[in-house]
Image: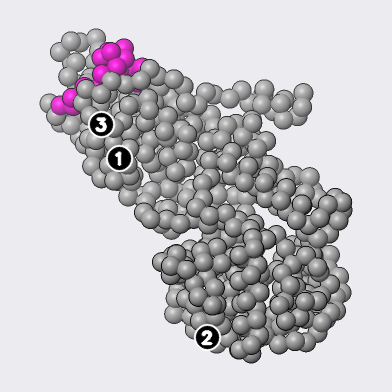
Amino acid sequence: FDVFFMTGTDEHGQKVERLAAEKGVTPKEFVDEVTAGIKDIYAKLNISYDKFIRTTDKQHEEVVAAVFEKLYNQGDIYKSAYEGMYCTPCESFWTETQLAEAKCPDCGREVSAAKEEAYFFKLSNYQTRLEEFIETNPDFIYPESRKKEMLNNFIKPGLQDLCVSRTSVKWGIQLPFDPKHVVYVWLDALLNYVTGIGYSPSGSSQQYKELWPADVHIIGKDIVRFHTIYWPIFLMALEQPLPKQVYGHPWLLFGSDKMSKSRGNVKYADELIELFGVDAVRYYVLAEMPHATDGSLTYEAIIERYNTDLANTLGNLVNRTISMNFKYFDGVVQAPQVADLPEQKALDEEIAAMAVATVKTADKAIEQYRIADGLNAILSYARRLNKYIDETTPWVLAKDEAQKPRLGTVLYNLLEGIRFLGVLLAPFMPAAGEEILRQINAGAKTYASLQAFGGLEVGTVLQKPEPIFNRLDAEKIQKEIAGE
């Protein structure tokens, strides 16, 4: 597929201004350091992207200022004063009635009274239009539970006009016609999706015309409100198309708690990579993240999944299959034969059919963002291949010279099944997927090559088997974590 993946960092606002002051550095120095760290984590996790946008990029700042002026000139923005309760971590204003036990309804932290001159966006003017759009585009907010929450809790009770500038904050994009104001962070940050591909009110790039509207925004569930209420309305006001879908993904909890620096339970990707390796971390996070409910991360669960799924099921399958092929056929892939016995033929056909079916199952799951389900389907096929070894007993076949063709067929089916696994696992675990395909010396590595079973060429010489995932010593790992 021709895919353009953009990610990046939202760098303005009061929270950044305060943290920088606490560290004794400028806001720009602070965000430069943070952004470098994020890019480093992406690299360590084998996450690639086509564009990394920073809201401090000059081009972004210029377009945001121009957009603000356009919206003001056409009457969507007006000047007034704001008085309400403000949550600095969430950078959100709340009314007294919106608070949860006098605290921020989003994060549960303390709020403080704030009053200042500000510009406001007339969200209320677009309420009916937004409601109609959501109702007539049922897949716009996904999953369904998030859509109901937005409609029933936020939109239908009535949209309040939105504060879109601040005077008490200096770290932000200055208004061109009123320099004591800076653009409030949400109007600034949300525009990155179009500024990053060349949108401008005065004339957009060819890239923007080709790529927009986005097929999907993938965002945390805690910021669905901003992406499904404010963002669509801003686009409507600019007479630009709306993204086709907003998917609000769940959180990854530590045990049953939300990760929080103040609680001291934040787990950093680079620490996990040092303990378990990059592919194991990617595998665990993707396998443990349910479709619409929060996932859980514990060291015990990572070790258990690693040993059960990666070492025992996947690693052992690849290692012993290649080892048997070297032992019985000097590492050369044999030509498969149609089995003589009906029960053998049925087994072989089941292995081939399940390979192709697994592709379709995983494909459908991923289309629906059911990533864990897709990964589970792939691992289920690996488990089936292990069972196939027990059913066909290659070590027994090897004792009878007359069974050599049958032995070659069994090993071919296993190696071809492993090729399917290598290709299917590549997006989840790039290094492991590549290593599987390297060890079987697969020529056919594309997703398109999985339309039919039998893509591994007869006569291929395999590479010497090397363990892809060794079992972890749970006790030793736990001692390392405890610093013993």
Crowd band around label 3 with a 10 angstrom C-alpha radius: few (<14), some (14–19), many (20+): many
Mark 2 element type: helix
For the residues labelled 1 and 3, say whether their Cβ atoms are less than 8 Å apart: no
In the foreground, 340 or 244: 244
Distance from label 3 to label 2 (Cα)? 55 Å
Mark 1 element type: helix
Which amino acid, by three-letter code, is at mark 3? Leu
Query: In percent of the image, x 17 and y 19: which residue is there?
Result: 405
Residue under label 3, please give it: 456
Residue under label 1, please give it: 355
- Vertical relation: 263 (above or below) 477: below
Quarter of the figure with residue 425: top left
- Provide residue 164's location: percent of width, then percent of height: 71, 77
Distance from label 1 to label 3 (Cα)? 13 Å
Relative to 353, 145 lies left or right: right
Mark 3 element type: loop
Query: In percent of the image, x 64 and y 30: which residue is there?
Result: 275
Crowd band around label 1 with a 10 angstrom C-alpha radius: few (<14), some (14–19), many (20+): many
Relative to 351, 271 lies left or right: right
- Provide residue 355's location: percent of width, then percent of height: 30, 40
Can you say which quadrant of the picture contains the N terminus? bottom left
What range of the chain is rendered magenta? 322-337
The mark nearer the N terminus, 1 or 3, is 1
Which amino acid, by three-letter code, is at mark 1? Ala
Answer whether residue 352 is magenta in the image: no
- Provide residue 79's location: percent of width, then percent of height: 75, 87
Residue under label 2, please give it: 129
Which amino acid, by three-letter code, is at mark 2? Arg
